Image (cartoon, helix red, strand yellow):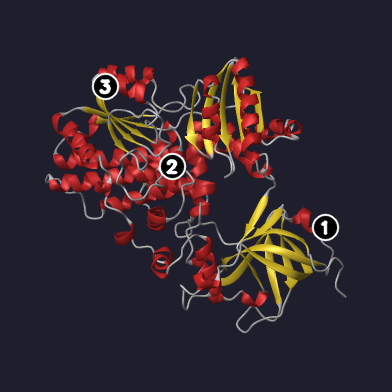
């Protein structure tokens, strides 16, 4: 793996941050923050200042009026959400808000229902068959969440059947958009100032707009009601990998505060089943523990289990559902490893190519996206993985910044039955072996065209090089101000060079982790004295055997805090390590 050290901020950029620690100035500049005011907003997010008025969405008032009217005259409303964590959390958020609104205005909360398609049997988006079903149920207003913008024909059919539609989405805008009320930051003519909301973020804006509209109509919600919705926003803002900048940074910052003291029985039970304690939940917890459990429902069976868990009204109901979700996630982990092992056998086919495409009989469409993502990270190239069922291929693509998978699918759309997604992540369906082979050939040619001159090698971004003496509590506290970490604001990583490795101690129940004692210098006043520090390296025991005692090593680390038995210590977590560039022989 190649280490790529980011350049330092130029002198004129550093001068814009007078009095700021040089490492902080460098990190801000690397994140595109170029003036003191912007730095203040980034390091100290404000709910009142950074969360925009929902009525800046051009269709917001129309959307609120339509929901109010439906409740007022007794029309049935269905929330049609996508099956992933973004769609599920957004659907729960709107369901909760509109049902409470119905109670406050004296309407029937039972007018509201939800519909989530089966990932494998129905696929993404609104289907004509679903419209027929909803019409037969007597639905008169459909609200799509995390889907709908690419379903113009189906929404037109809904209109013919007497169903109005409100689209709440954030996916790439297609050539033809639905003729209905649309709340979407990218739609033509949109006036909303922040473009990178997850669907749950767009749903949150809709809820905020409706709460204000209801107050205007004399049905005031409880003070601060909307802020208690932010636990859901915090989850999918991470799982949908939207940039944690601007309004998203504020939503995530305050959403994590709410998540750590959530009132929802379902989330409390889910956190407990994941072994998470209130007060310590961060974006890593969301990305690696909470999000996967919510997504496991649709990957292995149906998203209704995740929806029901988040909607649970009592601790007893929540515990039963959360335990089911936890077991479903274990099944998902086992199945993912099985497909990874099978797909790895095909890696010989990658030689000389700029893209990896593979398919397997019976591979679950709910899992292939995870597999594609793992291989895209490992290979540093775009990857498509398909599950094959007869002559039907259902797949997912994951990519690198240099390659837009949606643009690639557009080039081959004559071979695709369905497709959609984002530049870095997509889903698609292909009917027939001939179409599949044609797609493979065309996407490989397109990858060669786009990436022909690009050296595809896994890289580890490094923010700055430090000496041991630079690592002080002042720096630790400063780095903490960059939280929450996520897309476009990764956890800072630092390079420590020419360290003498003087001890290796296995830790953990199985000894798979190691604590590394290293020396380096020269030290600085206030640093970790005398010149010795300990690094923690998770799942590193085998790799550590390659380093001889007293050898010189370079290490890329993340700086954090370890709390144990009430004691706080600076913790340096190893991301990668190798023999030092400066000394290939053990020190004497």
Residue position marked by numbered label 2 in the rendering: 319
Name the secondary structure under disc 1. loop
Would you place residue 567 above or below residue 296 in this image? Answer: below
- Is any part of residue 312 visible from this angle? no
x, y percent for residue 280: 48, 59
Question: Which residue: 40% across, 56% down?
Answer: 246
Q: Which mark is residue 159?
A: 3
Q: CA distance from mark 3 to mark 2?
A: 40 Å
Quarter-of-image position of residue 389: top right
Circles 1, 3 touching at the beta carbon (< 8 Å): no
* Structural crowding at the residue carrying mark 2, measured as other residues with C-alpha within 10 Å and reported as few (<14), some (14–19) or many (≥20): many
Q: Residue tagged by mark 1? A: 546
Q: Position of residue 566 (x, y in %)?
A: 53, 70
Sooner in the amino-acid sequence: mark 3 or mark 2: 3
Quadrant assignment, res 453: top right
Q: Which of pointers 3 and 2 indicates the residue nearer the eye?
A: 3
In screen coordinates, is 513 left or right of 217?
Answer: right
- Do we see residue 204 in this rendering? yes
């Amino acid at each position: 793996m190649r280490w790529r050290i980011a350049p330092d901020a130029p002198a004129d950029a550093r001068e814009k941050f007078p009095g700021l620690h040089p490492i902080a100035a460098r990190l801000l500049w690397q994140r595109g923050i170029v003036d003191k005011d912007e730095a203040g907003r980034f390091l100290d997010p404000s709910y009142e200042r950074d969360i925009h008025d929902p009525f800046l969405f051009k269709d917001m008032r129309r959307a609120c009026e339509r929901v109010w009217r439906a409740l007022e005259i007794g029309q049935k409303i269905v929330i049609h959400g996508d099956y992933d964590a973004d769609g599920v959390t957004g659907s729960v958020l709107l369901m909760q808000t509109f049902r409470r609104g119905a109670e406050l205005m004296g309407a029937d909360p039972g007018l509201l229902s939800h519909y989530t398609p089966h990932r494998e049997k129905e696929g993404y988006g609104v289907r004509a068959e679903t419209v027929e079903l909803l019409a037969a149920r007597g639905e008169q207003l459909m609200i799509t969440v995390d889907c709908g913008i690419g379903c113009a024909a189906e929404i037109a059919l809904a209109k013919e059947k007497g169903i109005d539609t409100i689209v709440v989405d954030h996916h790439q805008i297609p050539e033809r958009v639905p003729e209905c009320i649309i709340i979407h930051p990218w739609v033509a003519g949109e006036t909303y100032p922040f473009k990178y909301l997850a669907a749950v973020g767009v749903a949150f804006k809709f809820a905020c707009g409706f709460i204000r509209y209801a107050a205007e109509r004399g049905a005031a919600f409880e003070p601060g009601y909307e802020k208690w919705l932010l636990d859901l926003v915090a989850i999918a803002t991470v799982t949908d990998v939207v940039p944690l900048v601007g309004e998203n940074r504020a939503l995530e910052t305050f959403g994590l505060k709410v998540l750590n003291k959530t009132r929802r029985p379902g989330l409390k039970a889910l956190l407990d089943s994941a072994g998470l304690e209130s007060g310590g939940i961060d974006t890593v917890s969301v990305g690696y523990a909470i999000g996967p459990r919510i997504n496991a429902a649709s990957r292995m069976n149906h998203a209704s289990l995740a929806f029901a868990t988040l909607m649970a009204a009592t601790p007893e109901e929540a515990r039963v559902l959360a335990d089911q979700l936890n077991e479903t996630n274990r099944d998902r982990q086992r199945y993912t490893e099985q497909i990874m092992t099978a797909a790895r056998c095909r890696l010989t086919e990658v030689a000389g190519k700029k893209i990896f495409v593979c398919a397997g009989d019976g591979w679950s469409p709910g899992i292939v996206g995870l597999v594609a993502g793992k291989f895209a990270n490992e290979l540093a190239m775009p990857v498509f993985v398909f599950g094959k069922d007869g002559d039907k291929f259902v797949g997912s693509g994951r990519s690198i910044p240099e390659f837009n998978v949606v643009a690639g699918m557009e080039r081959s759309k004559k071979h695709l039955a369905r497709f959609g997604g984002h530049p870095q992540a997509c889903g698609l369906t292909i009917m027939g072996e001939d179409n599949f082979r044609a797609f493979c050939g065309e996407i490989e040619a397109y990858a060669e065209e786009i990436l022909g001159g690009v050296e595809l090698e896994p890289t580890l971004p490094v923010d700055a090089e430090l000496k041991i003496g630079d690592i002080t509590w002042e720096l630790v506290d400063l780095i903490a101000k960059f939280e929450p970490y996520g897309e476009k604001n990764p956890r800072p990583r630092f390079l420590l060079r020419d360290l003498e490795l003087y001890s290796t101690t296995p830790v953990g129940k199985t000894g798979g982790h190691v604590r590394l004692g290293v020396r380096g210098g020269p030290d600085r006043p206030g640093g970790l004295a005398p010149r010795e520090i300990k690094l923690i390296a998770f799942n590193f025991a085998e790799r550590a055997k390659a380093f001889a005692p007293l050898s010189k090593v370079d290490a890329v680390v993340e700086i954090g805090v370890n709390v144990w038995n009430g004691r706080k210590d600076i913790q340096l977590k190893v991301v990668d390590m190798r023999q030092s560039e400066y000394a290939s022989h053990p020190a004497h």
